[in-house]
């Protein structure tokens, strides 16, 4: 393209046409946004802005062979809103979010041809398919004489940086956390650009991507809870540090407490906020005495669980498909479609499990403690392969993450790195009694049993006829009878585990 055409027409959100103030001779830089939908503290964007050249903000909705794992429905809902918020933020700075769909290289080629850009910057991704795609695209761009550079916006420390004493990667969380805490210092904050000007190539509308669910639109419960986008992310972090962080070490395990945890996971997933921003803000608040060390460090240690999951994903790219511990390849998993369906729809007859699965369906999110309980229930009480649960979470979570989801499922199932031992079977009754003692969580998500006294709320089948009838419940009609008996299901799981052990001994 003729570089003189770079004094391109730009359309603001109000439809006004302005001339670029930048020299017509400077070729633009394309910033290719992917899982980093933010303007502040964005290394690729910052590197482009520093060059004082026209900038093309590009998002490619990739499909085809090298597109990686297709997003689930709830994540697509989030992405739709996140892209819209990001596009509005860019327009306020005078720019345009250019949206393309298709093969990554082909879309980049089109935008390069249209704008005369000679440079592409992006922030790195870590799942195998995405890494392969990025390497291929980088090689293709270099062949075309286009400069391509990548940066880290997604992790505190990239997976290859921290090594154990013997030079391997960390497979156990605690030493990883200690090593990271000892050496990590957040880099200086990168400012939000003051303006974003450059060519405005042809673009799809975000609605053209068809990300919002239709027929049926199951997302009505999502809007009340979530504000996707950078502003929503920063508001959540600030609100959390303004109070709830103090009680976090104790309250984070109580699902009935609405602000017991930060709710930042989907914002982190789509890069509306980065972990370095969180680290910097939390450590500054601790240094200034604005928040306690107990709350601050506990919160940061959870952020580092996410980092640890990325280490596992990087070194075990098949984390979502294969047992990390191959002993589990011999696990005698069952196939039981009706049981899987009952679990998915919150109809197992175990109130804490059902509450969690309904919260997930209604809001696209589930409390961490309850994620562990429902995952344990699926893999141990029902003896169904963890991959069934991982896939369901992938489709229904707004924070479905290529690293944290499979790593956490394998952790709970016992097949993962640094995993909970298989023989630790979460008891859904005592877990409910301990972490939802006042029943607030179960009563909210299983209203049909709300009238039961606390004593029977987590095990409705232990209530006598009179108590059930006072609460207006006929078991098996208003609320299911338990799908399995806890004690015998636990024994069946332990027996299955014994077969694994004997396979290992015989091998
Ligand atoms: C079976 C199972 C599946 C999970 N799938 C996902 C997933 O797809 N995406 C996801 O982000 N988290 C996943 N988690 C981890 C955890 O449940 C969520 O990160 C957490 O509930 C998010 O809520 P929050 O932002 O309020 O967490 P907070 O307690 O406020 O924690 C702050 C942040 O730290 C990170 N974090 C906290 N706990 C963990 C953890 N155990 N592992 C990894 N990162 C953590 C998250 O980024 C989180 O946003 C899963 C856990 C289990 C047991």
Image: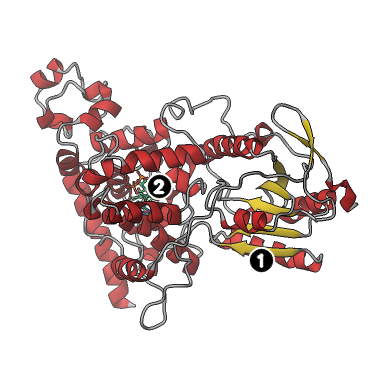
The reply to whether callout 1 and callout 2 are in contact (CB within 8 Å) is no
In the rendered structure, the answer to whether residue 338 lies left or right of residue 470 reads right
Measuring 72% from the left and 47% from the top, which residue is drawn there? 102
Q: Residues within 10 Å of mark 1 (few under 14, many from 20)?
A: few
What is the x, y in percent for residue 432? 19, 39
For residue 66, the mark is none
What is the x, y in percent for residue 202? 79, 40
Measuring 42% from the left and 73% from the top, which residue is drawn there? 162
Give the camera-side residue of 463 and 152: 152
What is the x, y in percent for residue 17? 79, 32
Mark 2 CB in 8 Å range of ligand 1?
yes
Look at the numbered disc 2 and give the secondary structure of its residue: helix
Check disc 2 and report the residue beneath it: 389
**Residue 495 sits above or below residue 85 on the image:** below
Measuring 74% from the left and 60% from the top, which residue is drawn there? 119
Q: How far separated are the C-alphas under marks 1 and 2?
A: 31 Å
Residue 366 at least partly seen: no
Give the camera-side residue of 260 and 11: 11
What is the x, y in percent for residue 90? 63, 40
Check disc 1 and report the residue beneath it: 135
In the rendered structure, the answer to whether residue 228 lies left or right of residue 431 reads right
Give the camera-side residue of 306 and 249: 249
The part of the image, by quadrant, that contains residue 144 is: bottom right
Q: Earlier in the sequence, mark 1 or mark 2?
A: 1
Residue 107 at least partly seen: yes
């Amino acid at each position: 393209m003729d570089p003189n055409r770079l004094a391109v027409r730009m359309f603001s959100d109000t439809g006004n046409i302005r001339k670029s103030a930048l020299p017509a001779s400077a070729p633009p830089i394309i910033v290719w946004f992917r899982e980093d939908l933010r303007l502040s503290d964005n290394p690729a964007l910052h590197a482009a802005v520093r060059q004082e050249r026209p900038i093309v903000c590009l998002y490619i909705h990739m499909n085809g062979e090298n597109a990686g794992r297709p997003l689930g429905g709830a994540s697509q809902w989030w992405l739709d809103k996140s892209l819209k918020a990001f596009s509005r933020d860019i327009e306020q700075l005078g720019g345009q979010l250019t949206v393309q769909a298709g093969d990554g290289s082909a879309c980049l080629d089109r935008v390069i041809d249209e704008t005369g850009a000679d440079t592409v910057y992006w922030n790195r991704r870590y799942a195998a398919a995405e890494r392969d795609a990025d390497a291929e695209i980088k090689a293709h761009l270099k062949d075309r004489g286009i400069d391509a550079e990548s940066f880290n916006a997604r992790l505190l420390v990239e997976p290859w940086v921290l090594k154990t004493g013997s030079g391997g990667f960390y497979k156990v969380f605690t030493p990883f956390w200690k090593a990271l805490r000892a050496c990590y210092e957040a880099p200086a904050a990168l400012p939000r650009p003051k303006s974003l000007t450059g060519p405005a190539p042809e673009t799809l509308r975000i609605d053209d991507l068809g990300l919002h669910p239709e027929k049926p639109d199951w997302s009505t419960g999502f809007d009340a809870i979530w504000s996707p986008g950078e502003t929503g992310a920063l508001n959540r972090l600030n609100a959390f540090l303004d109070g709830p962080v103090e009680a976090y070490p104790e309250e984070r395990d109580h699902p009935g407490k609405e602000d017991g945890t930060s709710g930042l996971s989907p914002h982190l997933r789509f890069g509306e906020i980065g972990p370095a921003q969180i680290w910097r803000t939390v450590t500054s608040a601790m240094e200034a005495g604005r928040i306690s060390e107990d709350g601050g460090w506990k919160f940061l240690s959870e952020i580092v669980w996410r980092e640890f999951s990325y280490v596992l994903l990087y070194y075990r790219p098949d984390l979502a498909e294969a047992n990390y511990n191959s002993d589990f390849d011999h696990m005698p998993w069952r196939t039981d479609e009706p049981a899987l369906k009952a679990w998915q729809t919150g109809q197992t007859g175990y109130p804490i499990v059902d509450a969690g699965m309904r919260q997930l369906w209604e809001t696209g999110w589930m409390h961490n403690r309850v994620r562990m309980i429902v995952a344990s229930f699926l893999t141990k009480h029902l003896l169904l392969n963890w991959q069934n649960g991982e896939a369901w979470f992938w489709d229904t979570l707004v924070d479905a993450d290529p690293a944290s989801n499979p790593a956490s499922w394998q952790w709970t199932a016992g097949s993962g790195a640094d995993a909970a031992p298989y023989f630790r079977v979460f008891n859904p009754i005592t877990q409910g009694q301990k972490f939802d003692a006042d029943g607030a969580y179960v009563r909210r998500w299983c209203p049909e049993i709300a009238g039961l006294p606390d004593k029977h709320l987590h095990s409705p089948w232990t209530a006598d006829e009179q108590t059930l009838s006072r609460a207006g419940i006929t078991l098996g009609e208003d609320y299911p009878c338990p799908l399995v008996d806890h004690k015998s299901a636990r024994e069946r799981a332990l027996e299955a585990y014994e077969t694994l052990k004997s396979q290992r001994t015989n091998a």
